[in-house]
Image (tube, rainbow, N blue to C red):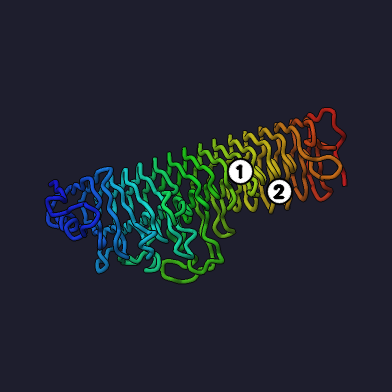
Amino acid sequence: MRINIENYGAVGDGQTKDAVVIQAALDEAKWREKGVTVIIPAGTYRLEKTLYVSSNTHIIAAPNARLVRDHDGYLVTNGRPKESFKGYDGHSNITIEGGIWDFNGVERRKMHNCFAIGHGENITLERMEIRDVAGAHAVEICGCRNIWIKGCRFLGFIDTGGRAFSEAVQIDLMKAVWVFSAFGTYDQTPCKNIWIMDCYFGSSGTKGSQAWPRGIGSHSSTIGVWHENIMISGNLFEALPKQAVRGYSWRNVQVRDNQLIDCGAGIEMASPPVTDVKDTKNIFGKQTGKSQPCEYVEIVNNIITGGLTYHHGIHIIGEKTGVQQNVLVTGNIIADAVEQSGFAGINVRYGDTVKISNNLVRNVKGTAVMVGRGKNHSINGNTISYTGGEGIAVNDSMEMVDIKNNSIQYVQGNGVLITGKTKIAVILANTIHGVSGGKKDKVYPISINQADHVTISVNTYVNATGEAQASYPLYISSSCSHVMQYGNHFPSIAENASE
């Protein structure tokens, strides 16, 4: 059944209060077994109360239909405050497409989500524009599965105080009322099967607003549950002051083919920190004092340019009790961080079975690729140039690292640095051209310190012009053991350095 809200008395003149009659049209879905399609024509609709969307509702709003919040609650939710659901049995099979959904956060500064979607499944948000949200999230997906967010624009955030971490799209779990206050129950239901694609995240240009702090992410967890099967692709993030994407207790994740321009940080995947007492409780509310492993992450073919004033370009951050396992970082471009940045292009900590391959890292102000506190890492085929730190750095008790076939040139630190009780490493067939060494700085094309069982073979180093020169090609500290080197090519440079 198709319903036009004008037939229910909606005016759309920007002055008339239209929420009651629009709600009457939406409520038809509760009485009709096959649901309804609700048409919202062009116009400006003043909404004096929250709209509630029931199962089997399809909303089609004209591109220039503007729905403006004129109250202090949510703009739209899929459940009323007195309703209560478990698992994924809430209002479901909902599609909302089109329209400009204006939270009006500069004038209405009471913090709420624009869209609060919980305990549902089979929900699509498509070709929508969501503007000027005060404090919270444009869309909060909480305890849902089978969610598609496609071709939407997330424009403008108003910081009402203490919410500089808010995501435009938050993927959350039904943890507690302070996580999701629209309705319950709070049974720890996580999100599963989430697709976010071809969207734009940035500023609205409204006076008193800013770009979103984060684009997509989570910031709460419960030990024993994960958000799973998440695909983020083809999105554009522009001038966000923090991360474009921040996965938190996620597994089975793909972040691919996105573009990040002038963002404070890039793409992060994190396990819950053991210092967070709220996020290290189990489903029964008992404090575990531990993190939890996260696994199966692909970060592929993203372009990250400018920015990096808040954190790293790509950051995989686990914990001793919450290792990030089976991670692929490949085909990404990370380039031209601003002068105020000091962060790495790629930083992995507490990872297990990690492949960093075929990335291009150029003109970042920190180290290009940095790994630590993990094992089974392959750093292969990357192209690195003009970094403010090391080309590749391995430190902090790493075990089993292959560094092969990388091209490294014009780095301020060492070309390849291995230190910090690293065990079992191979440095093979890397080409290094120019490090900022000389007599005043103890940096080298290849530097090994506190390492055991290291093979250094078939590497090539040639000094560059200007200051990008090293006095020695290779430094091996006396703290190392079982180091084998052969077949390296270091023309026109002195013998190895010694202590």
Q: Is residue 378 above or below residue 309?
A: above
**Mark 1 falls on what kind of element?**
loop
Side of 402 relative to 476 (left or right): left
Q: Which residue is mark 1?
A: 337
Q: Is residue 143 visible?
A: no
Viewer-proximal residue among 253 and 161: 161
- Classify mark 2: residues with Cα within 10 Å, few (<14), some (14-19) or many (20+): many
Q: Image check: 275 left or right of 465?
A: left
Question: How far is mark 1 from mark 2, CA to CA?
Answer: 32 Å
Q: Residue, x 19% and y 58% (percent of image)?
A: 23
Per the image, the residue denoted by label 2 is 423
Q: Secondary structure at mark 2?
A: strand
Mark nearest the camera among 1 and 2 is: 1
How far across and how far down the image is residue 205, in percent? 43, 49
| Earlier sequence position, callout 1 versus callout 2 | 1
Residue nearest the viewer, comparing 359 with 397: 359
Quadrant in the picture for residue 126: top left
Residue 101, above or below 189: above
Residue for point 60% across, 53% down: 350
- Whether 474 is drawn above or below 40: the answer is above
Whether residue 173 can be seen here: yes
Q: Which mark is residue 15?
A: none
- Could you tell me residue 133's position as x and y percent? 38, 57
**Disc 1 residue type?**
Ala
In depth, the one of 326 and 211 nearer the eye is: 211
Q: In front here: 403 or 39?
A: 39
Which quadrant of the view contains residue 333? top right
Badge 1 local density, few (<14 within 10 Å), some, or many (20+)? many
Q: Position of residue 123 (x, y in %)?
A: 29, 50
158 to the left or right of 431: left
Q: Amino acid at mark 2?
A: Lys
- Residue 233: which quarter of the image? top left
